[in-house]
Amino acid sequence: MSVSPLPDAVARQYASAANLNLRASLHEKYSVNPQGFMPWLFGQYIIRPGDSLLEVGCGNGSLWKGRLDRLPKGCRLTLTDLSQGMLDAAREALGTPDFVTFTQADIQALPFPDACFDTVIANMMLYHVPDLDAALAQARRVLKPGGTFCCATYGEFGVSGFLAKNLAEFGVTDALNHSFTKRTGVEPLRRFFGDVRWAEYADALEVTEADDVADYLYSLTGMANLDPARRPAIVAKLRGLMTDGVLRIPKEYGTFMCRQGI
């Protein structure tokens, strides 16, 4: 199967885990929901003894860090990513237990047999895929009958939209790809899965250090293309948006839980 490559800017963003880790740190430091998005996601999955699991676009493996021992007996986990750098980071974070396999792969052309996984997971990555229908068709193909496809994403009313609205004068735009969001993801998913449900994760950011938000913005270099010389002015503007020393930024995240029509 012929597939479309990732855009160059996206490929640069995820050549290693550095930018991803920096952006994750903002959420870890300032999110108001103490549970954390990854623990919440893990809690959404129904995993039975002996299940075979696949995560595509696994990134640095953060979904599984500290949680591999919570998988039921006999489970097998396959982690894939298009970036070898990301796979290396995941392997370093998780080690190499005998029930975990690391494979470089593209969701648009998965190298696995039909109907071989009980659960397929694609978190915060489908908006990067050039051919979404090809990706969803592959996810459905490798799922066993009755299997579940879990795909987390963001909504339109979150961090990126807030920053674009308030920092437009600096050339900040909503850099997020809206091809697969809480709202735009429903229709394509229903073309492949008969049962499509959304679970919302309630959260927001309460930031006390404006420089951390600037770091977040500049980690998007290649997508946002901000002028480094304007960073002090951006930080000053962010500080001006604070109330009682806190910058309150909305978040909108959750996951689709999908099953094939029976």
Image (tube, helix red, strand yellow):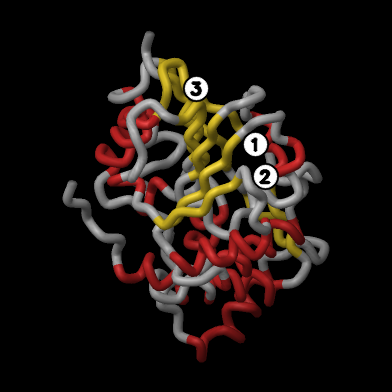
Residue 215 sits in quarter: bottom right
- Horizontal and vertical percent for residue 241? 67, 65
Q: Nearer the viewer, mark 2 or mark 1?
A: 2
Residue positioned most to the top = 262
Q: Is residue 55 left or right of residue 250?
A: left
Distance between mark 2 and mark 1 Cα atoms: 7 Å
Please tell me whether residue 60 is drawn above or below residue 115 in the rendered image.
below
Image position, residue 76 (x, y; %): 58, 37
Q: At 54% across and 35% down in the image, what residue appears?
A: 53
Residue 178 numbered mark, or none: none
Q: Which residue is mark 3?
A: 197
Is any atom of residue 154 visible in this view? no
The kind of residue on which mark 1 rests is Tyr
What amino acid does circle 2 point to?
Phe
Residues under labels 3 and 2: Cα distance? 18 Å
Q: Is residue 163 left or right of residue 169?
A: right
**Can residue 44 be seen by looking at this rendering?**
yes
Residue drawn 22% across the image and 55% down it: 4
SS at mark 2 in the image: helix
Element under disc 1: strand
Q: Tag 1 or tag 2, which sits nearer the N-term?
A: 2
Q: Which residue is mark 1?
A: 201
Which residue corresponds to the image point at 50% horizontal and 26% vertical from the top-left? 118
Q: Position of residue 141 (x, y in %)?
A: 32, 29
How far apart are labels 3 and 1 at the CA level?
A: 13 Å
Judged from the image, the secondary structure of the residue bearing numbered disc 3 is strand
- State the residue position of label 2: 37
Q: Position of residue 125 (x, y in %)?
A: 44, 50
